[in-house]
Image: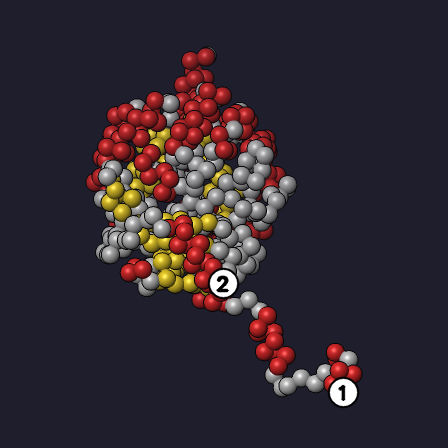
Amino acid sequence: AAAAHSPAEVPMKSGSLAAERRRRAPSPSRALLLRLAVISVLTSSRPADAVYRGTTSRGVLGRARGGRTAFAPSGPSLLSRRRRTSSLQMTDDGVSAVATPPTEANPYDFHTARESFTVETFSPNNHHHEGSEGTIPRVGAAMPAQRPDWFRVPAPGGIYTRFEELKDSLRDLKLHTVCEEAQCPNIGECWNGGTATIMLLGDTCTRGCRFCAVNTSPEPPAPDPDEPLNTATAISQWGVDYIVLTSVDRDDMADGGADHFARTVEFLKAASPHILVECLVSDFQGDKEAVERLATSGLDVYAHNVETVERLQRFVRDKRANYKQSLDVLRQAKEAEPRVYTKTSLMLGLGETEDEVIQTMKDLRDIDCDVITFGQYLRPTDHHLSVVEYITPDKFAKYGRLGEEMGFRYVASGPLVRSSYKAGEYFMTNMINTDRDNEAAAVA
């Protein structure tokens, strides 16, 4: 009689449907074993004192100290809501988030997670790695005991100060600033002084440098086509004599955003010819035509940061950036427009040696770089590279003297100095105007 029933009429025991679904569903333990097998193959030849990290779309599988294996599912508990990370790293107690290119739209969406495995040496005290050539900075390494007193800066004073006026102006025109995105310690001084470093091409970078607090994504939103004109309009209303334009890296654009930059400069010079314009830009992936397009746009200072000494490049910057490419960009800009001042910046406190800093200065002078700045690296979050050491003001002063002796036209060197810093703009303005007055007098 039972055979006469249709499939829909066959009686089922209570709970059997749920049991059948569970039987057919992939077993979590089976999936875990598969991932373990992959890790085992990839890391079988690695030393026992290493930390292995595998990042997948569902989480991170890693072998921790003592050979323990742990799978950390991705989820809100492991994520920084503000940073929106898409990769994880081992800490003393297990796994924590690190700042590699995250997903912008949804902090818990891992569709851009990198399906890759990496190996990182692990020391019992979680210190920076001491290699044969020197110290290598690490994410999650122990920080120096306490931040020195010389880093204390006053907060912006007053509610309705010029700081707020500038902030409102930026919001009204939908402009971004690196002052906010990079958490600059000098924001109060600069904004109350009526100037800011405008960040073009959106607020999302295509690269994932280990020192930077800017949002990252491999597919950022398209740039605003009205931004060049809006930026020129805003700046011309501020009554400033010097402005810095910068941007995120846009490797998704054919020219890296060089033409967008150049049009912004052209609009700004048309509206306010007296304003001196500095552009702090990416390496445009080494595209010489992009560099030349911007260098000949009418800007006054072409800035591109080498960020750190040659040995530490691959540990600090995104893999698409490198020391030689950065030097080439500065050289090409000067060759394209000799009257343009070239400028770069280094972060200190990442494990570099004094000899390495001096060699970097020599390399920059060899390509006729005019201006260099030195500042202390400050970790924006605990998901970024830890500080190796706090450089003393005396050491900064020494680098400043050495730079001047080597022939740099201007050197700014101090713990809180940043590549875009209002105090430095006064010196740049005076230097450029003096040079041009002398040129005019010579012609007359």
Horizontal and vertical percent position of residue 434: 39, 24
Residue 203, x across and y down, in percent: 52, 48
Picture layout, residue 62 above or below residue 377: below
Mark 1 highlights which residue?
1
Q: In the drawing, does residue 349 fall left or right of residue 254?
A: left
Q: Distance from label 2 to label 1 (Cα)?
A: 42 Å
Query: What residue appears at the point 27 percent right and 49 percent down from the top-left corner?
Result: 128
For the residues carrying marks 2 and 1, which lies nearer the camera in this image?
Answer: 1
Which picture quadrant has residue 436?
Answer: top left
303 or 62: nearer the viewer: 62
Residue type marked 1: Ala
Q: Earlier in the sequence, mark 2 or mark 1?
A: 1
Residue displayed at 23% across by 32% down: 355
What quarter of the picture does the N terminus occupy? bottom right
- Could you say where residue 125 lies in the image, as x and y percent from the top left? 24, 56
- Which disc is residue 267 wearing? none
Q: Name the residue: 46% across, 58% down.
A: 35
Asked whether 3 or 262 is in front, the reply is 3
Q: Amino acid at mark 2?
A: Ala
The residue at 40%/41% (across/down) is 317
Q: In the figure, is residue 128 to the left or right of 435?
A: left
- Check disc 1 and report its element: helix, strand or loop: loop
> Is 186 displayed left or right of 172 in the figure?
left
Rendered location of residue 289, percent (x, y): 54, 25
Q: Based on the displayed image, in which of its 4 quarters is residue 61 positioned?
A: bottom left
Find disc 2 in the rendering and name its residue: 31
Residue 230 in view: no
Q: Which structural element holds mark 2? A: helix
